[in-house]
Image: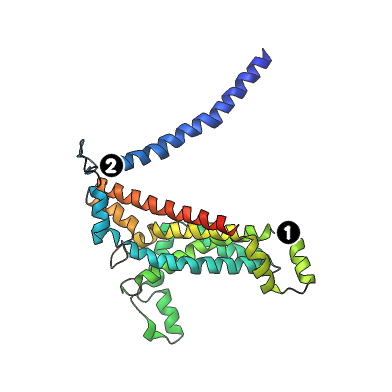
């Protein structure tokens, strides 16, 4: 009787840890995805019980109407900023992978911004960039009053300001991934390199970079995907005004402000396809370099 009970309990555990997660995944991930694709082929406004099938009309509108597709140019600022973000993260990870005083303190300082909520970061940098705020005060202290600008109001610089905020927020995340990858390299390799006369630059160039190449590509693909789907920072700080609207903000406005859920669903599908293409390109590049 005890054996039967143990066997039944084991089967229930197997069922719980396999079937239930699959059901949850299908219910909350794949089913909404299917419905999104379905809505993208209609003119549903979000509250009307019925909708009309319009085929690929929504996709044609997005690809031909500059209002919807050209907002991707805003992502270019975040795309460029992502390389600065990766560069800083790799630099600090490399430095702190060697023997440095107060290493844990510096690691905490670098990773702390990533722990903050996006809303909190938005309000912090609103004060940082506002007229007479932190940045203006610092520039004034160094006698650079002529460099003070409308950091969030000037179209020529507001996206750069927002991109810098994103760099500050996510550098710690990339830093942690790089640091973990670098520390996974066998320490004996570094010791052998030092015996052969290799300096820190040689170790970085010939040991660290080849060893973490896949992680570098992973971080690049995450950064590119993130630059395409930026939302919270510009939405909180500017509301998408003065040319700071991103594709995701435009999608949300289309769905909930203008009640064009069908069109917004098509925009979401296009964004998903772009991310998938970028991911596939990353995998192809990694295979070619192996």
Percent x, y of residue 40? 28, 44
Check residue 140 in the rendering and tell me which mark sits there, or answer none.
none
Q: Using the image, determine if residue 80 lies above or below residue 262.
A: below
Q: Is residue 134 left or right of residue 182?
A: left
Q: Using the image, determine if residue 194 lies above or below residue 187.
A: below
Q: Is residue 80 left or right of residue 149?
A: right
Circle 1 is placed at which residue position? 186
Which part of the image, by quadrant, shows the C terminus?
bottom right
Q: Using the image, determine if residue 16 lies above or below residue 209.
A: above
Which tag, 1 or 2, sits closer to the chain's start? 2
Percent x, y of residue 9? 61, 22
Q: Is residue 235 left or right of residue 186?
A: left
Percent x, y of residue 159? 36, 69
Q: Which image quarter: residue 148?
A: bottom left
Percent x, y of residue 75? 38, 63
- Pick the residue in front: 195 or 87: 195
Q: Which image quarter: residue 216?
A: bottom right
Circle 2 is placed at which residue position? 39
């Amino acid at each position: 009787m005890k054996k039967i009970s143990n066997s039944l309990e084991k089967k229930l555990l197997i069922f719980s840890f396999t079937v239930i997660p699959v059901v949850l995944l299908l219910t909350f991930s794949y089913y909404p995805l299917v419905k999104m694709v379905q809505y993208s082929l209609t003119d549903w406004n979000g509250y009307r019980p019925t909708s009309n099938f319009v085929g690929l009309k929504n996709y044609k509108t997005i690809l031909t109407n500059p209002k919807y597709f050209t907002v991707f140019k805003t992502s270019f600022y975040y795309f460029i900023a992502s390389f600065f973000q990766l560069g800083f993260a790799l630099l600090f990870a490399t430095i702190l992978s060697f023997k440095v005083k107060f290493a844990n303190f510096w690691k905490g300082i670098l990773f702390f911004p990533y722990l903050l909520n996006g809303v909190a970061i938005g309000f912090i940098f609103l004060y940082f960039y506002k007229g007479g705020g932190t940045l203006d005060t610092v520039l004034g202290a160094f006698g650079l009053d002529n460099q003070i600008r409308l950091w969030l109001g000037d179209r020529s610089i507001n996206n750069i300001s927002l991109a810098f905020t994103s760099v500050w927020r996510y550098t710690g995340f990339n830093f942690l991934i790089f640091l973990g990858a670098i520390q996974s390299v066998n320490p004996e390799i570094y010791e052998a390199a030092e015996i052969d006369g290799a300096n820190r630059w040689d170790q970085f160039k010939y040991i660290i970079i080849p060893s973490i190449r896949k992680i570098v590509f992973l971080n690049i693909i995450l950064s590119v995907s993130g630059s395409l789907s930026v939302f919270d920072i510009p939405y909180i700080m500017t509301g998408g005004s003065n040319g700071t609207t991103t594709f995701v903000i435009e999608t949300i406005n289309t769905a909930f402000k203008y009640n064009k859920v069908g069109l917004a669903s098509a925009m979401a599908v296009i964004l998903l396809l772009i991310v998938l293409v970028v991911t596939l390109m990353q995998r192809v590049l990694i295979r070619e370099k192996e």
